[in-house]
Image (cartoon, rainbow, N blue to C red):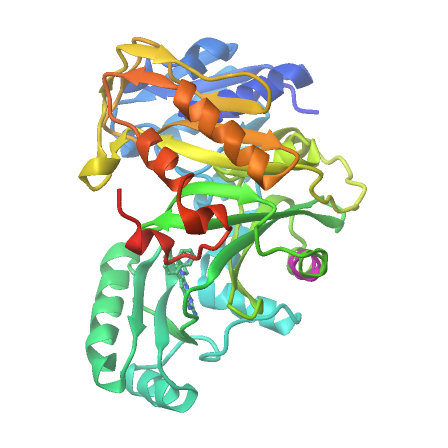
């Protein structure tokens, strides 16, 4: 096991990692920006090092400062959490060059999956279902248009360097192709410095269902069932649940096995997520692979009784996994509580939390770094808490979640709590009938 772990992150995920490290008897080092000097991750870690100003590029993305903090404190591993440097191949490589274990995959693996057309080609080669479309990258607009005419509209252009919806354009008719091509390539070029595109048939009103996986350093891999993440707004997830309302035992086995095949094909090490789109006929297609621990990991932990961070650290330290997969015994849901105003286009609402009462009781887990008097800085993402409800059935989970959200008192900032309470009353949501288009028509 590691002697000491540095956590290159902030907020609730830094706390989440510190808590597991404590249980494992592994000392921790927090790094923090000047804006985070009063944060709980700084207080809960055994040591803390200030690495720069409030600006992420100066602190949580500042590789030389983080490596310097790691060397000074003599850690032998770095946990990147999610966001920031978690999927930065260069950072993974620099850690390796400094003999510090990056708790996550190698630079090659991150690059291989970070290039979306390459990831798709890798999956197609080993027999994981992919969406019909171009064979790799498109040479030019003309090639794309000819292919779109052949496979039929609607189609979607995707930036190979993309993800999170940037550099992506739906195209519904041939005459719109050229304009969409220009918009997508320009956006990808300016966002990622890479305008390369691939093309797919557009799947209408899909579900976003992802499979959690874990792989060890010896070629073993297992799946840990699915999460339904279809409730998103502008590619930001708001609520996730497991099992997915559309899941069947048969579909879970098929998707789970596809995800294991994906992991084994690339010799995946660590925890990861294989994202799929599921169409109306329950055909599923590989979309992307995330090579990090994700925000919504707790719902999986709750339904299979498994500490994903602990297992992630263990495989990074070279421990073996049994290779058996896990199937849900419970139902769980996560509501992301963001400091945003749901009545005003989800505008960020940073500032001081003047009053706070967190819910609790049976079936409720709260992952948060905030406390009464805490000032939410405007420089980072607006998620301030995750309310996770777990119960035997979906119906009971919804009742527990509603009860918890009603108990939640927070003053001084606006939050997404009223949105969640409304969502949990929506007729279609209650029936489990929702796709990635759900939020486009949802009215507060
Ligand atoms: C798609 C799609 C429909 N058809 N691909 C969105 C982000 C990126 N990871 C892929 N995305 C999509 N790819 C085909 N061929 C629809 C989306 C999509 C989406 C996917 C998952 C969750 C929310 C979404 C919202 C809009 C579009």
Quadrant including the C terminus: top left
Q: Is residue 300 visible?
A: yes
Q: Residue at x 66, y 71 (%)?
A: 127
Q: Is 223 drawn above or below residue 356 in the view shown? A: below
* Residue 409 locus on image (x, y percent): 35, 16
Q: Is 393 drawn above or below residue 163 in the view shown? A: above
262 lies left or right of 175 = right
Q: Nearer the viewer, residue 41 or 60?
A: 41
* Residue 274 locus on image (x, y percent): 57, 54
75 lies left or right of 423 = right
Q: Nearer the viewer, residue 11 or 62?
A: 11
Image quarter for residue 57? top left
Q: Residue at x 43, y 86 (%)?
A: 151
Q: Is 345 drawn above or below residue 211 in the view shown? A: above
Which residues, given as a range, are shown in magenta? Answer: 254-261
> Is 7 within the magenta?
no
């Amino acid at each position: 096991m590691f002697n000491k772990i540095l956590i290159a992150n902030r907020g609730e995920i830094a706390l989440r990692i510190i808590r597991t490290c404590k249980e494992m008897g592994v000392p921790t080092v927090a790094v923090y920006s000047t804006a985070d000097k009063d944060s709980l991750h700084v207080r809960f870690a055994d040591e803390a090092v200030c690495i720069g100003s409030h600006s992420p590029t100066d602190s949580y993305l500042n590789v030389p400062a983080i490596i310097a903090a790691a060397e000074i404190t003599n850690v032998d591993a770095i946990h990147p959490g999610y966001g920031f440097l978690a999927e930065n191949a260069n950072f993974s490589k620099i850690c390796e060059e400094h003999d510090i274990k990056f708790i996550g995959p190698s630079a090659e693996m991150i690059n291989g999956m970070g290039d979306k057309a390459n990831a798709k080609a890798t999956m197609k080669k080993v027999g994981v279902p992919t969406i019909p479309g171009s064979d790799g990258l498109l040479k030019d607009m003309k090639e794309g248009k000819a292919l779109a005419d052949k496979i039929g509209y609607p189609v979607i252009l995707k930036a190979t360097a993309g993800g999170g919806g940037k550099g992506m354009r739906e195209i519904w008719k041939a005459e719109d192709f050229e304009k969409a091509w220009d918009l997508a390539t320009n956006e990808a070029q300016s966002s990622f410095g890479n305008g390369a595109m691939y093309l797919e048939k557009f799947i209408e009103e899909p579900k976003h269902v992802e499979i959690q996986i874990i792989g060890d350093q010896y070629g073993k891999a297992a799946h840990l069932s699915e999460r339904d993440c279809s409730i998103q707004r502008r590619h930001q997830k708001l609520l996730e649940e497991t099992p997915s309302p559309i899941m069947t035992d048969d579909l879970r086995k098929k998707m789970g096995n596809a995800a294991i095949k994906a992991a084994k094909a690339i010799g995946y090490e660590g925890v990861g997520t294989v994202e799929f789109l599921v169409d109306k006929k329950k055909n599923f297609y590989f979309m992307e692979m995330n090579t990090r621990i994700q925000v919504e990991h707790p719902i999986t932990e709750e339904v299979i009784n498994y500490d994903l961070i602990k297992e992630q650290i263990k495989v990074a330290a070279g421990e073996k996994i049994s290779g058996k997969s896990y199937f849900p015994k419970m139902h769980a849901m996560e509501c992301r509580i963001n400091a945003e105003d749901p009545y005003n286009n989800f505008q960020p609402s940073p500032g001081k939390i003047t009053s706070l009462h967190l819910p609790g009781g049976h079936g409720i887990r709260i992952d948060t770094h905030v406390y009464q008097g805490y000032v939410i800085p405007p420089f980072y993402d607006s998620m301030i808490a995750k309310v996770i409800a777990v119960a035997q059935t979906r119906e009971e989970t919804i009742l527990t979640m509603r009860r918890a959200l009603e108990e939640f008192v927070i003053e001084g900032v606006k939050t997404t709590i009223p949105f969640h309470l409304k969502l949990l009353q929506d007729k279609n949501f209650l029936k489990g009938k929702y796709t990635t288009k759900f939020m486009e028509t949802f009215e507060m």
